Image: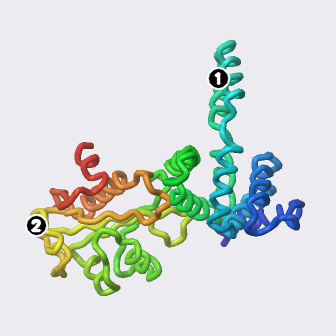
Amino acid sequence: MFNLKDIISSIADVGKKIFKKKDSIKKNDVESIVSLCDDLLSNKGAAFGITVAREITDLYQTLSDENKLIFFKKINEKYKASHSEVDEAINIYKKKQDDKNLFNLFRIAEGKRRELFTRMNMSPSGTPVILSLREDLIKQLKNNQDLTSLDNDLRYLFRSWFNPGFLKLEKITWETKAVILEKIIKYERVHHIKDMNDLKIRLGEDRRFFSYFHPALDDEPIIFVQVALGKGLGKSIQELLKPTTAGNTKNDTATFYSISNCQEGLSRVTLGNFLIKRVVYEIQEELPHIKNFGTLSPIPGFRDWYSY
């Protein structure tokens, strides 16, 4: 049985037969990868596009930190919107205000950066590499404010690519795959998990642990939340982290005590609010006797859910 990645990889392999630049591509070379970006935007067919996208994502991972910065600056400038073309499109629209000219205005005003990243995402490894690319970009923003517009384009796309409708919510239990449990320990940033024994306590009968996953990121948590069930709101985090007895039917309150964003590349892409709403629904479905929901400390998105 083939999965989508296998199919895309097969198409890319076919595309290699018609891809003429292979021998001229150099690793850790900015000009090579920018030239491939031009090819990717050239509309030469699906097989060709997937092949070039894979070459770009493979080549990006060979770039040094210095060359990554040069690459960011080149594509930021090269594929930005042309002010003169925008002015011309505005004048055309003013003369004839129809849907065709309005669409053309939007297309030109957007520039080509978003289209470049969208086509790069055709690569079998597109999503994880572009996520890593944004993580690299974020590290450069403090000293390179001119790259903010490039980051804004990526955030715009990620809001669509990581829309909760595309994400899968999973309940994390002691039966969850070990590779995922190990990543949970690694990514917990609010209340440190010391080891597997400590994690097992967090997954006890009076605990609920949920995480979002994306189909393009194998066994890679996106964001997760931890909930303690009890009689009334927990008084302290120390109390909530203590081992508990088997499920208590007298529990009436779910206390959200930790939420962790696992992917630096998704910084400032809001998911916490959606996760909390979904988890509240899941708990209400599983445990109808839980009537109250609260948090000990400010958790991003909880106030938004409460006001919803």
Q: Position of residue 277 (x, y in %)?
A: 31, 53
SS at circle 1: helix
Q: Residues within 10 Å of mark 2 (few under 14, many from 20)?
A: few
With 115 as the anchor, is 274 left or right in this view? Answer: left
Q: Kindly state the secondary structure of the residue where label 2 is placed.
A: loop
Disc 1 from disc 2: Cα separation: 58 Å
Choose between 306 and 58: the one closer to the eye.
Answer: 58
Q: Is 207 in front, or is 129?
A: 129
Quadrant in which residue 169 is drawn: bottom left
Label 1: which residue? Answer: 99
Image position, residue 33 (x, y; %): 75, 59
Along the viewing direction, whichever of 138 and 271 lies nearer the viewer: 138
Q: In the rendered structure, which amino acid carries the disc numbered 2? A: Lys
Q: Quadrant of the C terminus?
A: top left
Which residue is found at the position 52% from the left and 54% from the top? 143
Q: Could you say which quadrant of the image residue 285 lies in? A: bottom left
Q: Is residue 117 left or right of residue 214?
A: right
| Residue that numbered label 2 is attached to | 235
Q: Position of residue 89 (x, y in %)?
A: 69, 23
Residue appearing at x 64%, y 54% in the figure: 72
Three-letter code, disc 1: Asp
* Horizontal arrangement in the rendering, residue 110 relative to residue 78 (left or right): left
The answer to whether residue 157 of the structure is visible from this angle is no
Q: Determine crowd level at label 1: few under 14, some 14-19, many 20+ residues with C-alpha closer than 10 A.
A: few
Quadrant of the snapshot with the N terminus? bottom right
Q: Is residue 189 above or below residue 71?
A: below
